[in-house]
Amino acid sequence: MSETLFSKIINREIPADIVYEDNLVLAFRDIAPQAPVHILVIPKKPIPKLADAESQDHALMGHLLLTVKRVAEQEGLTNGYRVVINTGSDGGQTVDHLHLHILGGRSMTWPPG
């Protein structure tokens, strides 16, 4: 996988407003927020998109979701939040590094778009 914007953030080559980090994942505020709270949670392992995750990534996938829960609690999103994973160009993915969007701080509408 070629170097992406997110791998540069992981490597601290590009600054980011990091809100959580452990040995497997990094969470930071989106630079173009679509809600009052808009945080991206990314694995440090370079997986281009959800469709590229393998069976050996099952623990990491669970860790990503539990990190979403932890970060949402940390951000005070007690009334709820939305988690979005865009996959591939038709899914709206613009960075080829798996990432989960946490959107909150306002009521979400459906359908999303």
Image: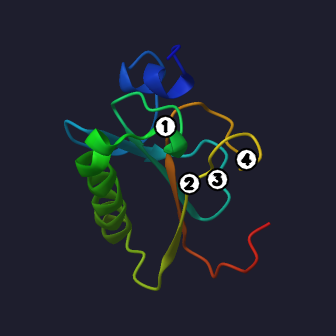
Q: Which mark is residue 85?
A: 2
Q: CA distance from mark 4 to mark 1?
A: 16 Å
Mark in front: 4 vs 3: 4
Residue drawn at point x = 32 percent, y = 44 percent: 55
- Asked if the residues shown at circle 3 and circle 2 are in contact, with their CB atoms under 8 angstroms apart, the answer is no
Q: CA distance from mark 1 to mark 2?
A: 13 Å
Q: Closer to the N terminus: mark 3 or mark 1?
A: 3
Residue drawn at point x = 51 percent, y = 15 percent: 3
Q: Secondary structure at mark 2?
A: loop
Q: CA distance from mark 4 to mark 3?
A: 15 Å
Q: Secondary structure at mark 4?
A: loop
Report the amino acid beneath label 4. Answer: Gly
Q: Which residue is mark 3?
A: 33
Q: Closer to the N terminus: mark 4 or mark 2?
A: 2
Q: Which residue is mark 1?
A: 52
Report the amino acid beneath label 3. Answer: Pro
Residue drawn at point x = 49 percent, y = 17 percent: 1
